[in-house]
Image: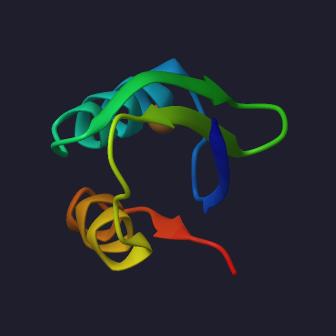
């Protein structure tokens, strides 16, 4: 499992959008978003570059934190 910090999530709608965006990336599954912590965890069936994840997240209006 990998964990990333995501800025800008405020409600269940946001976490749903983030989950959907991450699961739309090939190789990523089992996404769980923790709104309180502002984190998402996911499983990778193959290595997924962080740049792909950043792009998918920024496309829906959020930001992967460093
Ligand atoms: Cu929201």
Q: In the shown orientation, is residue 6 left or right of residue 49?
A: right
Quadrant, the N terminus: top right
43 or 65, which is in the foreground?
A: 43
Above or below, comparing residue 59 to residue 33 in the picture: below
56 or 36, which is in the foreground?
A: 56
Q: For residue 53, which quarter of the picture?
A: bottom left
Which residue appears at 52% of the width and 19% of the height? 12
Quadrant, the C terminus: bottom right
The x and y percentages for residue 59 are 20, 66
The x and y percentages for residue 9 are 58, 45
The x and y percentages for residue 18 are 39, 39
Which residue appears at 15% of the width and 43% of the height? 26
Report the label total: 0
Which residue appears at 63% of the width and 45% of the height? 2
46 or 15, which is in the foreground?
A: 46
Which residue appears at 34% of the width and 79% of the height? 51
């Amino acid at each position: 499992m990998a964990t990333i910090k995501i800025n800008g999530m405020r409600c269940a709608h946001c976490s749903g959008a983030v989950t959907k965006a991450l699961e739309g990336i090939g190789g990523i599954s089992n996404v769980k978003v923790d709104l309180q912590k502002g984190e998402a965890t996911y499983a990778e069936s193959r290595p997924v570059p962080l740049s792909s994840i950043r792009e998918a997240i920024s496309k829906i209006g959020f930001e992967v934190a460093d």
